[in-house]
Image: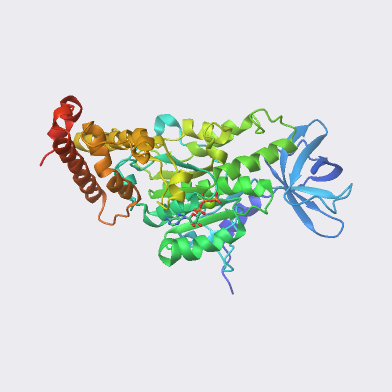
């Protein structure tokens, strides 16, 4: 005879409410259901289940409460809903992640999408959890090897840092994110695919990540055809999975593609509640939504793990002042801008280094490394300012030592930004050091008379 765990059974029974309140649909207006009979039981954000006359069930989320009724946005179209349809309240959205979730693809409710049964963990966690209080957080951790020379050196990523990849459509955000999923140092990767095209999921799993990448990754996905509630929940569910592994002491890499789709989903939900779009079509609550999500990443409590995050942001027409980009630039600890012109000349990742920053600098690098980074940026900036003149054939060697140095190494620096590295951070810095030395030599040889000794002085400190 099978053993019955009486303690577990009685604990489960104790949680059950002996009375289940049943509400009724009393109006359907602009896609929103008005429900009577549940307003004194329901809380904002609760889930509801509506049973249609056809027997079909529809779930939804409570978005607004008023005396006598509540307003719920259904997860599908309200087609087929009729007045008087019964409505019950569900437990708030929660997940029970465990180690068996690694290597799996799930939807925002925790259902497996890869056709295999999914084990649940013992503990359930709310998908809208509060971030670790600022006063209890550890500091940013060590620098991480990224597999890309530019992120190992000039745009360092440290444990617990949160960075954004900003670019227009088709400039290579998802490809760079996939690179991080595969190569950035981490124990577990949690990837949220929010509102992206359906085919991108298979592409990510089979091509971008492959078997090797999937071995350490949990994918949470809600594609563009799903309801705005589901797409918004996708980001929260992925954050909850990341927090689960962080609380086990792991270093988690949380990737989200894209936060723009998350913001758009929130805009649709907010419009259904009647919130006025005041920020170029976005509701005022967007700032809080984005900030609260980003705050869930970062260093954990002292002694626990950390969540390093990379979020993609779509900036239409390279408009970095549009609301989503503007809010995120202020909140994140670094941003990497991808440029269409660079992509068009075939250099991937199309990082515009001069527009990108990592706020973990200068602390994340030592004095010599910071000097190298400053010098590399100065060379790129010098070249960029003179680029039109160079292309017009007006550049003349020997007139400006800084420009001579920049022209000599520009191509190498440009390739360095795109270079893959497998030997770690030090190897990347060694490569950069060689380029800077070459620039130094070019400045000496080609323009001794006009050499600016003051500007080159810090380089004298570089060990031979
Ligand atoms: N590292 C790379 N090497 C070669 N080509 C690349 C690379 N990264 C991106 N591309 C090219 O750019 C295209 C778009 O890349 P990707 O899908 O990553 O862009 P995206 O910014 O995520 O686009 P969307 O805004 O549509 O989501 C790819 O299909 C590919 O042709
Ligand atoms: Mg993409």
Residue 214 rendering spot, x and y as whole percentages: 45, 62
- Compared with 394, 177 (above or below) is below
Is 215 situated left or right of 282 in this image?
left
Q: Which residue lies furthest to the top in this view?
A: 454
Q: Which residue lies furthest to the right in this view?
A: 83
Give the side of residue 187 with respect to residue 19, left or right. left
Residue at coordinates 58% horizontally, 65% vertically from top-left? Answer: 4
Give the farthest residue toward the bottom.
Answer: 1
Is residue 61 left or right of 309 when viewed as pictured? Answer: right
Quadrant in which the N terminus is drawn: bottom right
Q: Where is residue 380 in the image (x, y as percent from the top left)?
A: 32, 38
Q: In this view, does 384 lie above or below 79?
A: above
Vertically, is 196 above or below 207? above
Task: Point out the residue furthest to the front here.
Answer: 393
**Residue 426 appears at what percent x and percent y?**
22, 48
Percent position of residue 128, x then y: 57, 41
Number of marks drawn: 0
Considering depth in this image, is 6 or 295 the residue closer to the camera? Answer: 295
Q: Can residue 417 be seen in this view?
A: yes
In which quarter of the view is residue 399 placed? top left
Q: Nearer the viewer, residue 223 or 230?
A: 223
Name the image quarter holding the C terminus: top left
Q: Can residue 139 be seen in this view?
A: no
**406 and 427: which is toward the camera:** 406
Colour setup of the view: rainbow
- Judge by depth and name the residue closer to the eye, 273 or 247: 273
Q: Is residue 458 shown left or right of residue 378?
A: left
């Amino acid at each position: 005879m099978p053993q019955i765990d009486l303690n577990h059974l009685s604990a489960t029974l104790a949680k059950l409410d002996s009375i289940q309140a049943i509400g009724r649909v009393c109006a359907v207006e602009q896609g929103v259901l008005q429900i009577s009979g549940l307003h004194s039981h329901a809380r904002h954000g609760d889930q509801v289940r509506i049973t249609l006359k056809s027997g079909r069930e529809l779930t939804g989320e409570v978005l607004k409460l008023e005396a006598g009724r509540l307003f719920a946005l259904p997860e599908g179209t309200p087609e087929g809903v009729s007045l008087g349809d019964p409505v019950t309240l569900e437990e708030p959205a929660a997940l029970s992640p465990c180690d068996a979730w690694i290597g799996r693809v799930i939807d925002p409710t925790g259902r497996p999408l890869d056709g295999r049964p999914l084990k649940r963990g013992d503990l359930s966690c709310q998908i809208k959890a509060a971030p670790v209080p600022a006063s209890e957080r550890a500091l940013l951790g060590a620098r991480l090897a990224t597999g890309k020379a530019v992120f190992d050196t000039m745009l360092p990523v440290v444990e617990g840092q949160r960075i954004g990849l900003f670019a227009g459509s088709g400039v290579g955000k998802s490809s760079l994110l996939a690179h991080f999923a595969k190569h950035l140092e981490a124990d577990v990767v949690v990837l949220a695919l929010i509102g992206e095209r359906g085919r991108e999921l298979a592409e990510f799993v089979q091509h971008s990540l492959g078997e090797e990448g999937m071995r350490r990754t949990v994918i949470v996905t809600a594609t563009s055809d799903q309801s705005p509630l589901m797409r918004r929940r996708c980001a929260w569910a992925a954050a909850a999975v990341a927090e689960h592994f962080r609380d086990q002491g792991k270093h988690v890499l949380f990737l989200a593609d894209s936060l723009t789709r998350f913001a758009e989903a929130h805009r649709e939900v907010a419009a259904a509640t009647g919130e006025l779009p005041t920020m170029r079509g976005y509701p005022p609550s967007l700032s809080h939504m984005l900030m609260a999500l980003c705050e869930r990443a970062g260093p954990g409590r002292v002694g626990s793990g950390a969540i390093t995050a990379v979020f993609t942001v779509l900036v239409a027409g390279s408009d970095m002042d549009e609301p989503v980009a503007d809010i995120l630039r202020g909140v994140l600890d670094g941003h990497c801008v991808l440029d269409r012109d660079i992509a068009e000349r075939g250099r991937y990742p199309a990082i515009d280094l001069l527009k990108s920053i990592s706020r973990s600098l200068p602390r994340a690098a030592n004095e010599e490394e910071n000097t190298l980074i400053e010098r590399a940026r100065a060379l790129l900036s010098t070249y960029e300012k003179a680029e039109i003149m160079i292309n017009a054939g007006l550049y003349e060697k020997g007139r400006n030592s800084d420009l001579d140095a920049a022209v000599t190494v520009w191509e190498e620096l440009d390739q360095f930004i795109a270079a893959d590295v497998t030997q770690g951070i030090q190897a990347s810095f060694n490569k950069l050091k060689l380029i800077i030395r070459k620039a130094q030599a070019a400045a000496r040889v080609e323009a001794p008379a006009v050499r600016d000794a003051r500007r080159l002085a810090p380089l004298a400190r570089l060990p031979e």
